[in-house]
Amino acid sequence: MSRHIKEPEYNYDSQFESNFVSSEGCLSKNTIFCFKHIDKDYDADKLCNKKTENNLKKAFIKKIQQISKIEIALVQSNDRTGFGYELLNTNQLKKDIPNSVTQDIEKVHVFRFGGKGRIVGYYNENIFHILFIDPHLELYNHGS
């Protein structure tokens, strides 16, 4: 199993580790969103600045709420303009993925919100790690 997250160095014993449920034992088949590895230039501050309209902020919250309520299989089979996503090669991004993520990620998942906003990240099992919130379509070339 590829983790895609650089593991922090901890000094702990195996008893500590056994207190956690493994991801294989997770009962949820729905997406869980993680903001831990988000890039500082594309985080909530980017979404909540004066340049971003209030309806786009609401659309972001609504999108992650909707996706988290449906099973991943439905997300995967849905169109990118609905609840689905599109895959994008990381070399198409204008910014490198955060250093806290291993460099073996070659593609990212892109969810659309509010017409012109994008949520960019990747799945590790049912956890979607948000790397970038792009409310102004600045992170990659969208064509003409």
Image: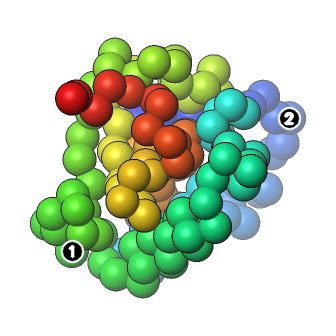
Residue at 24% x, 40% y: name it: 87
- Image-based side of 10 in relation to 25, left or right: right
Residue at 67% x, 47% y: name it: 51
Residue that label 2 marks: 11
Q: Callout 2, which amino acid?
A: Asn
Res. 71 in view: yes
**The C terminus: image quadrant:** top left
Mark 1 Cα-neighbour bin, 10 Å: few <14, some 14–19, many ≥20: few
- Image-based side of 36 in relation to 89, left or right: right
Q: Could you say whether the residue bearing mark 1 is in a helix, strand or loop?
A: helix
Q: Callout 1, which amino acid?
A: Leu
- Give the mark, 1 or 2, whose residue is nearer the N terminus: 2
Res. 21 in view: no
- Image-based side of 50 in relation to 52, left or right: right
Q: Could you say whether the residue bearing mark 2 is in a helix, strand or loop?
A: loop
How many marks the image carries: the answer is 2
Q: Nearer the viewer, residue 10 or 46?
A: 46
Residue at 35% x, 37% y: name it: 108
Q: Using the image, determine if residue 121 lies above or below residue 115.
A: above
Residue that label 1 marks: 74
Residue 21 - label: none
- The quadrant holding residue 69 is bottom left
Query: Can you tell which of label 1 and label 2 is closer to the viewer?
Result: 1
Residue at 42% x, 64% y: name it: 114
Q: Where is residue 66 in the image (x, y as percent from the top left)?
A: 42, 79
Q: How far apart are marks 1 and 2 (CA)?
A: 40 Å
Q: Where is residue 109 in the image (x, y as percent from the top left)?
A: 33, 45
